[in-house]
Amino acid sequence: MNPLAAAPTEKHLTSSAMLQDIVIGLSDGLTVPFALAAGLSGAVQSSGLVITAGLAEIVAGSIAMGLGGYLAGRTEVEHYGAELAREHEEVRTVPAVERREVQELFVAMGLSEPTAALATNELVQDPTQWVKFMMKYELGLEEPDPRQAFKSAFTIAGAYAVGGLIPLSAYFLTATPHAGLLWSGLITLVCLLVFGYFKSRMTGQAPVTGALKMAAIGATAAAAAFYVARLVQGHG
């Protein structure tokens, strides 16, 4: 019997940057426009006003979220570039200190002192690989994709728009804001449960707990917005 064939398959979480951006955009898109529409439903008598305000919020929210994703991506690239330049400078100006740090890292990884010394001597022969080693194992930094900022911007903005249109869609099909709120709440609650379930599974958390947490957040935000709007309207 082949022992390799009998070995169990290891399961690891592989979360791409795009998946993370979709999660960010959808989670906010499902909750923020839903809360806004719920709040307006408690204050106005026209579904048209809810739709208009909801669409405006989705556009503004998509732009803001996309811009936030772009700035975060650019900040990561700039931070990596600055640290890379600093490491190159330190390797050039204080090589003895950097060599000692490399050897300490090898020892921390489990190598014996003699083996760590040999590995260090081998590594420092190539300054480029030396710096890459320090960036990854001393600073914990991986080189980011310079195009990721644009990708994140469009992915987050698109996911936010899709998420926001889900709760707003009910108001296109109902005659009054209150009827729209009931259907919107039902649709959004189901979407939050499904989204929370699969999000938790992908991140290695308890799926049912994650689904309930996501639904609770959306419901709490919507209820708060609805009753605040009613309270303000009652004192108006």
Image (cartoon, rainbow, N blue to C red):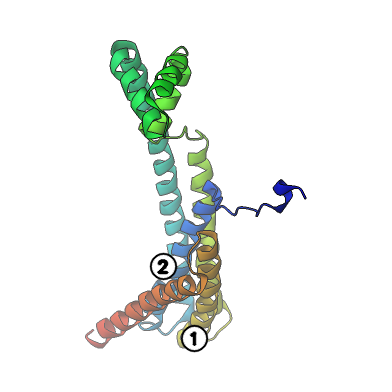
The residue type indicated by label 1 comes to: Leu
Q: Residues within 10 Å of mark 2 (few under 14, many from 20)?
A: many
Measured as percent of width and height from the top left, residue 49 is found at 44, 75
Q: Position of residue 68 (x, y in %)?
A: 40, 48
The structure residue drawn at horizontal position 46% and vertical position 64%, both measured from the top left corner, is 27
Q: Residue at x 31, y 85 (%)?
A: 230
x and y percent of residue 169 in the render?
Answer: 56, 74
Task: Relative to 131, say whether 55 is above or below.
Answer: below
Would you say the residues marked 2 and 1 are in contact, meaning their CB atoms lie under 8 Å apart?
no
| Quarter of the figure with residue 98 | top left
| Label drawn at residue 232 | none
> Which secondary structure lies at badge 2?
helix
- Which residue is located at x 52 percent, y 63 percent? 199
Q: Nearer the viewer, residue 188 or 170?
A: 188
Q: Is residue 80 visible?
A: no
Q: Earlier in the sequence, mark 2 or mark 1?
A: 2
* C-alpha span from label 2 to label 1: 17 Å
Residue 93 placement, left or right of 153: left
Q: Amino acid at mark 2?
A: Val
Judging by the rendered image, the residue that carries numbered circle 2 is: 32
Q: Nearer the viewer, residue 28 or 196?
A: 196
Q: Is residue 192 left or right of residue 96?
A: right
Screen quadrant of the C terminus: bottom left
Would residue 233 be found to the left or right of residue 185 on screen?
left
- Other residues around mark 1 within 10 Å, as few (<14) / some (14–19) / many (≥20): some
* Residue on which the image places disc 1: 182
Rendered residue at 50%/53% (across/down): 20
Question: Residue 1: x and y, percent?
Answer: 77, 50
